[in-house]
Amino acid sequence: MSTTDPEHPPVSADGCGFAQTRWSLILAARGGDAPQAQQALSHLCEAYWYPLYAYIRRRGHTADEAGDLTQGFFARLLERDFFGAADPVKGRFRAFLLASCKNFLANEHDHARARKRGGGRSPKSIHLGSAEGRYSREPSHDLTPEKLFERRWAVTLLDRVLARLREEFTARGKETQFDQLRVNLVGERGGPPHGRAAEELGMTAGAVKVAVHRMRQRYRELLREEIAHTVEGPEQIDEEIRQLFAALSS
């Protein structure tokens, strides 16, 4: 069921090829002019900009301020000298991004610059027009900005994994099967019995059971691959999984 997506290179169980994942590539190129590392950073920013927007909003900034600050921060992050001048938090891109944003917001000079350059060089896939609509649907309970950031990060990551899995099923002409069986993935409840799903899909109950097992297995593989892009080494993947699911349950 695996694919060969050049933007999502596979991560083997023993870590072979891990240096080619995005965050480790960025760290390896720190202080240098490496187009591949810049592209990798841009991809990560495009994927995970919203958790940072939500963090900035929860700190008390208005929608307009949060939009300007998010754009300004990512414009700064994507400058070629950023990693030469900064001291990245080793390990996880998630921790680095939040720590860097805190420093950015605490610096009044950068704060003022961010308000002026909302049109700066930021990832082209950051659609701030949808940001406030998404934020308006956030739970109103008293999550700290940091907790909200972690929860949104976890949800964003799982959404990306689910989207990749659906793309794989669609490419094989099994989009309907995916839509019927996705409720059986980890963390989802209320799926129909295998017999009912089998009747709707024209499969046997045994075949549905096998399909669900394979779907769950592939989901776990894609989850580890997605997380691998945001940590420095394979030994950090399991701990990151635990932290992300803890964020969802908090």
Image (cartoon, rainbow, N blue to C red):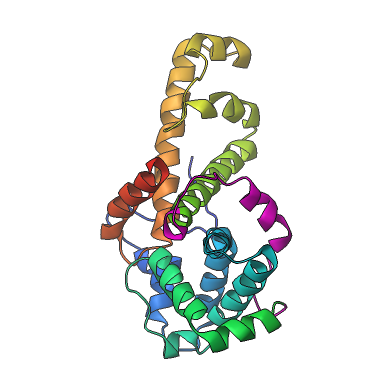
* Viewer-proximal residue among 141 and 221: 141
Q: In this figure, what is the number of numbered marks?
A: 0
The structure residue drawn at horizontal position 43% and vertical position 60%, both measured from the top left corner, is: 146
The structure residue drawn at horizontal position 44% and vertical position 13%, both measured from the top left corner, is: 206
* Viewer-proximal residue among 231 and 73: 73
Q: Is residue 133 magenta?
A: yes
List x then y, in percent, for residue 61: 60, 66
Apparent side of residue 26 relative to residue 166 in the rendered image (left or right): left
The range drawn in magenta is 119-147
User: In the rendered view, would you say 78 is above or below 55?
Assistant: below
List x then y, in percent, for residue 249: 38, 40
* Viewer-proximal residue among 51 and 240: 51
User: In the rendered view, would you say 19 is above or below 51?
Assistant: below
User: In the rendered view, would you say 188 is above or below 145?
Assistant: above
Location of residue 66 by image quarter: bottom right
Task: Report if residue 170 is visible in the image.
Answer: yes
Task: Report if residue 10 is visible in the image.
Answer: no
The structure residue drawn at horizontal position 44% and vertical position 39%, both measured from the top left corner, is: 218
List x then y, in percent, for residue 231: 36, 63
**Position of the C terminus by quadrant:** top left
The structure residue drawn at horizontal position 46% and vertical position 25%, both measured from the top left corner, is: 212
Location of residue 173 by image quarter: top right
* Viewer-proximal residue among 2 and 116: 116
Q: Is residue 13 magenta?
A: no
List x then y, in percent, for residue 125: 67, 64
Apparent side of residue 240 relative to residue 55 in the rendered image (left or right): left
